[in-house]
Image (cartoon, grey):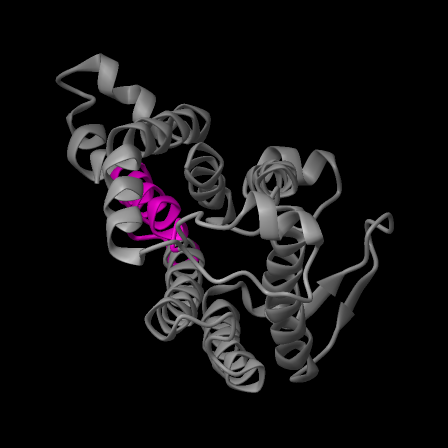
Amino acid sequence: MLYHLLYPLADEVGAFNVFRYLTFRTAGAMITALIVSFIIGPYLISHLKSKQNGGQPIREDGPETHILTKQGTPTMGGLLILIALSVSTVLWADLKNGFVWVALGVTIAFGAIGFLDDYIKISRRQSRGLPGKLKLVLEAAIATVATLWVMKIMPGDLATVMAVPFFKNLLVDLGWFFVAFAVLVIVGASNAVNLTDGRDGLAIVPVIIATGVFALIAYVVGNRVFAAYLQLSYVPGAGELSVFAGALIGG
């Protein structure tokens, strides 16, 4: 939003020219998400505590320490991340960029599944939420739509191609199998985060590290000069995902 509102005024106000730089907007998104979290976090957590009457029931087959340390902890905390991420991304990203909307849409949709899962647990006072198979079906459906969307906005020669790490010129065209592969990656990555968080409650550190790496990759392949220098496939518009990644790290 700020990009569309202020950057066109750069000819009149030179300072607004900074909005053309991804690095500036990525940093802005990160700081904005952090500020939003600090502002609404205490109120949201207090509200969730007052509504949940003891927090989410803890699974008895999980780590024993969770029964002692996580009992009474309010759930649905992902709402805070989603709000901070969404607000920051909308403020700082180029809203005409399809990659941004795919990433934000998938994140919100998967967050909605998590919200429904937690709501069932809280309302029924049990540790089981949505059936596992139903969650996988919903996640696969969302991932399929996202994959087809990405294939549509990608350059034609890269729409179904997988780049093999460490081999700069090795591109494997998966054809329509790319859809199944991408769905597997999206759903698998989502559940990997859930498993990590469920194991020790500290998924945020791996998420920050992974997101930082993805931000760097997106920035490089979205920059024609850097992509050519590093012999990587140039993907127009992909660099805008670094703004989304910055918002996620800050949130």
Q: Position of residue 138 (x, y in %)?
A: 47, 81
Q: Is residue 118 left or right of residue 44?
A: right
Location of the C terminus by quadrant is: top left
> Camera-side residue: 237 or 137?
137
Residue 234 in sight here = no
Q: Position of residue 249 (x, y in %)?
A: 49, 36
Which residue is nearer to you in this view: 251 or 180?
A: 251
Q: Nearer the viewer, residue 251 or 155?
A: 251
Q: What kind of secondary structure does the magenta stretch mostly adopt?
A: helix
Boundaries of the magenta span = 76-99
Above or below residue 116? Residue 52 is above
Q: Is residue 132 visible?
A: yes
> Residue, x 44% and y 47% (percent of image)?
73
Nearer to the camera, 29 or 50: 50
- Judged left or right of residue 18, residue 182 is right
Q: For the point 31% across and 56% down, which residue is it?
A: 53
How many numbered circles does the render carry? Answer: 0
Residue 178 falls in image quadrant: bottom right
Residue 11 place in picture, x, y as percent: 18, 20
151 sits left or right of 160 in the view: left
For the N terminus, the quadrant is top left
Q: Position of residue 143 (x, y in %)?
A: 52, 74
Does the magenta segment cover residue 62? no
Figure quadrant of residue 211:
top right
Q: Is residue 89 magenta?
A: yes
